[in-house]
């Protein structure tokens, strides 16, 4: 059975003068999916999300969100979205409650329903006790939680979140992640842009990796890890100090780096590399204290892909 698409992007291109910020990008997001959009700073993540949410127009390409063309049917598409931009802020001279009332009214949510949803959201994000306080007195974490409340007041079908946990304290970050995961389990599609690789690995069904405006890969995090040749590694420690340069001379070792009292080596064939390490230790009269084989991390894959693209 063919799955319905929440987002369909083809040939998406955006230039700012000489800079090609987004270069013929193509990908799809399924309904109900938790989709991660990864890339280093300046890779084109924010420009892409601004196009998807109708803030700016592309120079070329097509974007459909929940069946609506974002260029031709922007109002219908935006009615189904909840958006937390990277550089957003609530109205500082309004209270948290009045911010929600204003945004709810803009979305056409009836007054009583606005009140009901606002109360529920503020309680869920632990802001209810501060509902009548001006936002200018809020911490960064509180403002970010309020922005999520504002994005959810219209009960959107898809959430676009641009670095929603960047710079937050541990408690605020954890609460925001828990609420986003709960919303996804309830069926909402989540489109998350981030440069936090571990966050994407923990949360996302699939990820797209973008670098210099181009898509380097789109797949499930685990699949990206398993099909990345040359990124398997062994972490080994000896009973005395060994120079990395010596380890690099071992047959089958592609790369080696020191990590505390251990050395991490990257290989293609773990079995052959272990035999070579044992022979190396014997020849140097070394004792192997610990040895662990490791699958490539998503960070390893990410760094490899952005170097290649």
Image (cartoon, rainbow, N blue to C red):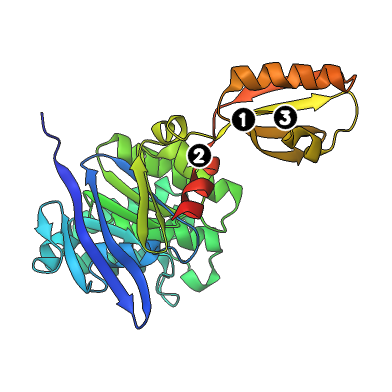
Do residues under tags 1 and 3 come within 8 Å of each other at their CB atoms?
no
Q: Is residue 217 above or below residue 265?
A: below
Query: Sequence order check: which comes first, mark 1 or mark 2?
Result: 1
Do residues under tags 2 and 3 come within 8 Å of each other at their CB atoms?
no
- Say which residue label 2 marks: 298
Q: Is residue 136 visible?
A: yes
Give the camera-side residue of 5 and 12: 12
Query: Sequence order check: which comes first, mark 1 or mark 3?
Result: 1
Q: Residues within 10 Å of mark 2 (few under 14, many from 20)?
A: many
Tag 1's secondary structure?
A: strand
At 56% across and 56% down in the image, what residue appears?
A: 168
Query: Sequence order check: which comes first, mark 2 or mark 3?
Result: 3
Q: Quadrant of the N terminus?
A: top left
- Say which residue label 3 marks: 250
Q: Nearer the viewer, mark 2 or mark 3?
A: 3
Gap between marks 1 and 2 measured at Cα: 13 Å
Instruction: Give coordinates of residue 80: x percent, y percent.
Output: 18, 55
Q: Is residue 134 visible?
A: no
Q: Residues within 10 Å of mark 1 (few under 14, many from 20)?
A: many
At 42% across and 32% down in the image, what residue appears?
A: 227
Gap between marks 2 and 3 measured at Cα: 26 Å
Gap between marks 1 and 3 measured at Cα: 14 Å
Q: Residue 81 vs residue 98: left or right?
A: left
Q: Quadrant of the C terminus?
A: bottom left
At 26% across and 44% down in the image, what residue appears?
A: 189
At 28% across and 40% down in the image, what residue appears?
A: 33
Q: Residues within 10 Å of mark 3 (few under 14, many from 20)?
A: some
Give the camera-side residue of 107 and 289: 289
- Say which residue label 1 marks: 233
Using the image, tell me which numbered label, if any, was put on residue 30: none
Tag 3's secondary structure?
A: loop
């Amino acid at each position: 059975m063919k799955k319905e698409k929440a987002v369909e992007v083809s040939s998406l291109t955006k230039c700012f003068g000489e800079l090609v910020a987004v270069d013929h990008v193509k990908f799809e997001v399924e309904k109900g999916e938790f989709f991660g959009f990864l890339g280093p700073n300046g890779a084109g993540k924010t420009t892409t999300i601004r196009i998807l949410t109708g803030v700016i127009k592309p120079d070329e390409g097509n974007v459909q969100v929940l069946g609506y063309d974002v260029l031709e049917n922007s109002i219908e598409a935006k009615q189904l979205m909840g958006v937390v931009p990277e550089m957003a802020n609530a109205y500082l001279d309004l209270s948290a409650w009045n911010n929600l009332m204003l945004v709810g009214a803009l979305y056409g949510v009836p007054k009583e329903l606005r009140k009901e949803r606002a109360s529920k959201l503020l309680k869920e994000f632990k802001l209810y006790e501060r509902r009548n306080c001006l936002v200018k007195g809020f911490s960064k974490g509180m403002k970010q939680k309020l922005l999520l409340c504002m994005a959810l007041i219209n009960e959107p079908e898809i959430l676009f979140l641009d670095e929603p946990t960047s710079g937050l304290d541990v408690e605020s970050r954890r609460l925001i992640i828990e609420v986003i995961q709960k919303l996804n389990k309830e069926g909402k599609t989540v489109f998350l842009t981030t440069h936090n690789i571990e966050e994407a690995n923990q949360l996302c069904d699939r990820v797209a990796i973008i670098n210099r405006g181009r898509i380097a890969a789109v797949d499930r995090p685990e699949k990206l890890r398993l099909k990345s040749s040359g990124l398997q590694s062994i972490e080994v420690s000896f009973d005395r100090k060994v120079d990395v340069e010596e380890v690099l001379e071992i047959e089958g070792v592609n790369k080696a780096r020191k990590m505390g009292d251990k050395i991490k080596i990257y290989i293609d064939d773990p079995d052959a590399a272990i035999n070579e390490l044992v022979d190396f230790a014997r020849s140097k009269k070394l004792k192997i204290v610990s040895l662990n084989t490791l699958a490539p991390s998503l960070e390893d894959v990410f760094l490899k892909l952005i170097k290649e693209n």
